[in-house]
């Protein structure tokens, strides 16, 4: 009985979930966001190999830390090299990409993100942290309420629609002190091109996956897009608004800015 009580009377481990939500432009996403080939140095420091396959080679010792495969000092190919373009325009790509890197790779990640922000290639829009216990969900929401005009019998009213990026993480700590993460990602965004009585349609993206990580490793989910469309009209005031002939005095420009959201998740066991 004493053995059973001792086994049951065990402190439940807590897990700190650190997330970094990064908004990256197309250039940064293609160069880094989905080129997540990762290498791990052997203990003797003589060789390294890609976790996800690809080329191998020799290098100096890295003290067992993971390093990014696009480091200019490494002459290897990427283990993962899938440009995160739309599935409809590029069937060879994937909508939601997932990869992971070691704690050493996470340090390199912070440096790379800081450099990208300095060059206006990416922006860390949120860095939430949440503590949860083993086998319990942690819920992280990043978003905003967008106003729109709703037309009804009572007149025109201002209402709001949620545009959220939601990350649900459930950690499971194994006996080997690894962490099995159940990840669920939702992104809801209004589509004002399709409306019913002023209310926009909701575009929904969802991804679910499970990944096994060591304590302090980082996993990343990519392929979540934010598309902003703008229309600008320039011309001669007064003349540009004339019917029929106004277009001869007006210049219309439609632009589309597509950015990718990269979600980095790092679990750490707290005992």
Image (cartoon, grey):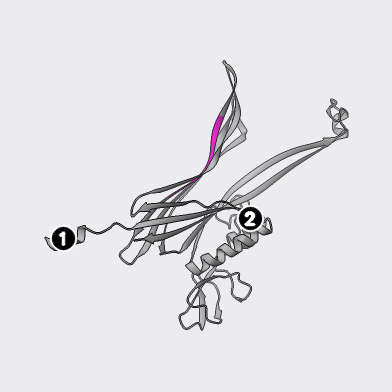
Is 120 a magenta residue? Answer: no
Q: Is residue 98 left or right of residue 238?
A: left
The disc at residue 159 is none
Secondary structure beneath label 2? strand
Which corner quadrant of the image does residue 56 belong to?
A: bottom right
Which of the two residues, 121 or 224, is positioned nearer the viewer here? 121
Mark 1 = which residue?
A: 4
Q: Is 199 drawn above or below residue 54 in the view shown?
A: above
Q: Residue at x 62, y 76 (%)?
A: 73
Residue 224 percent location from the top left of the image: 56, 50
Magenta segment main secondary structure: strand
Residue 187 percent location from the top left of the image: 52, 44
Residue 188 visible at all? no
Q: Is 203 drawn above or below residue 222 in the view shown?
A: above
In the rendered image, the quadrant that contains the C terminus is: bottom left
Q: Which residues are magenta?
A: 160-168
Residue 172 percent location from the top left of the image: 35, 57
Which corner quadrant of the image does residue 152 belong to?
A: top right
The disc at residue 122 is 2
The tally of labels here is: 2
Secondary structure beneath label 1? helix
Q: Residue at x 60, y 49 (%)?
A: 88
Q: Residue at x 73, y 44 (%)?
A: 255
Ranked by sequence position, the earlier of labels 2 and 1 is 1
Q: Residue at x 56, y 64 (%)?
A: 109
Is 161 a magenta residue? Answer: yes
């Amino acid at each position: 009985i004493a053995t059973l009580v001792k086994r049951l009377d065990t402190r439940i481990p807590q897990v700190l979930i650190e997330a970094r939500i990064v908004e990256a432009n197309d250039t940064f996403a293609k160069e880094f966001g989905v080129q997540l080939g990762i290498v791990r140095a052997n203990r003797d420091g003589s060789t390294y190999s890609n976790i996800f396959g690809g080329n191998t080679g020799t290098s100096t010792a890295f003290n067992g830390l993971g390093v990014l495969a696009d480091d200019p000092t490494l002459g290897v190919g990427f283990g993962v090299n899938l440009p995160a373009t739309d599935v409809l325009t590029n069937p060879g790509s994937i909508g939601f990409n997932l990869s992971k890197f070691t704690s050493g790779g996470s340090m390199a990640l912070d440096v790379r993100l800081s450099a990208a922000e300095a060059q206006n290639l990416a922006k860390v829009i949120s860095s939430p942290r949440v503590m949860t216990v083993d086998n319990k969900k942690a819920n992280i929401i990043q978003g905003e309420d967008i106003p729109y005009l709703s037309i009804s019998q009572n007149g025109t009213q201002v209402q709001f629609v949620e545009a959220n990026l939601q990350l649900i993480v459930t950690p499971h700590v194994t006996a080997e002190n690894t962490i099995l993460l159940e990840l669920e990602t939702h992104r809801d965004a209004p589509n004002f091109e399709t409306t019913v009585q002023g209310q926009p349609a909701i575009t929904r993206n969802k991804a679910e996956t499970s990944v096994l990580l060591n304590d302090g490793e980082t996993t990343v989910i990519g392929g979540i897009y934010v598309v902003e469309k703008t229309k600008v009209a320039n011309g001669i005031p007064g003349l540009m608004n004339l019917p029929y002939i106004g277009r001869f005095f007006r210049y219309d420009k439609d632009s589309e800015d597509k950015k990718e959201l990269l979600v980095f998740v790092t679990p750490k066991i707290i005992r």
